[in-house]
Amino acid sequence: MNEILQFLTDNHIFYLATIDGSTPKVRPFGFVMAYKGKLCFCTNNFKDVYRQLKVNPEFEISSTSETMEWIRLKGEATFITNLDSKQAVLDAEPSLKKIYSIDDPTFEVFCADKVEATFYNMKGETRTVKL
């Protein structure tokens, strides 16, 4: 997990894809943390991404490094929103306090379950990690 977390942290902006009905939807994300042994992310419950993950929890993430290595991560979202998970997010990324507070009812935290991450490079080499 540490290698995946490091790649996503080092390449701060990554793209998270969901399905809306039969249409793929992709948007940038920039926050990831390790929490209780899982990769976790946050959003708010008035965004389409939240609604889409509640209907179909499968998602995919992709990010590229400056050295043209990239990752494709697929997983299943499990929402774990509670005071402890919210506080962990705010501790891990204090700048999010400008957007959320621990008692904000729109603030949601989700973890990735059934994770499979594949690392790629320009030489055509791949390596897959399952969590």
Image (cartoon, rainbow, N blue to C red):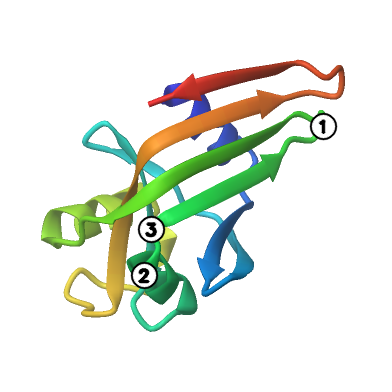
* Disc 1 element: loop
Please report whichever mark, 3 or 1, sits nearer to the chain's N-terminal start: 3
**Where's residue 71, x and y in %?**
64, 34
The answer to whether residue 117 of the structure is visible from this angle is yes
Q: Which residue is mark 1?
A: 68
Label disc, if present, on residue 55 of the rendered structure: 2
Q: Nearer the viewer, residue 22 or 109?
A: 22
Residue for point 50% across, 21% down: 129
The x and y percentages for residue 117 are: 54, 31
Residue at the (83%, 19%) spot, across then down: 124
State which quadrant residue 82 falls in: bottom left
> Quarter of the image containing the C terminus?
top left
Q: Residue 87: name its quadrant.
A: bottom left
- At horizontal 55% and vertical 49% (from top left) the residue drawn is 60
Secondary structure under the numbered disc 2 in the rendered image: helix
How far apart are the alpha carbons under marks 1 and 2?
34 Å
Q: Nearer the viewer, mark 1 or mark 2?
A: 2
What's the distance in space between the residues labelled 3 and 1, CA to CA? 29 Å
Work out whether 95 lies above or below 119. Answer: below
For the residues labelled 3 and 2, the Cα–Cα distance comes to: 6 Å
- Residue 70, compared with residue 16, is above or below; it is above
Depicted 2 relative to depicted 50: above or below: above
Q: Which residue is mark 3?
A: 57
- Considering every residue shown, the one lying at the far bottom of the view is 46
Outermost residue, left direction?
83
- Residue contact between numbered discs 3 and 2, judged by CB atoms under 8 Å: no
Q: Amino acid at mark 2?
A: Val
Residue type highlighted by circle 3: Pro
Residue type for callout 1: Met
Q: Dividing the image into 4 quarters, which one contains the N terminus?
A: top left
Residue farthest along the right direction in this orientation? 123
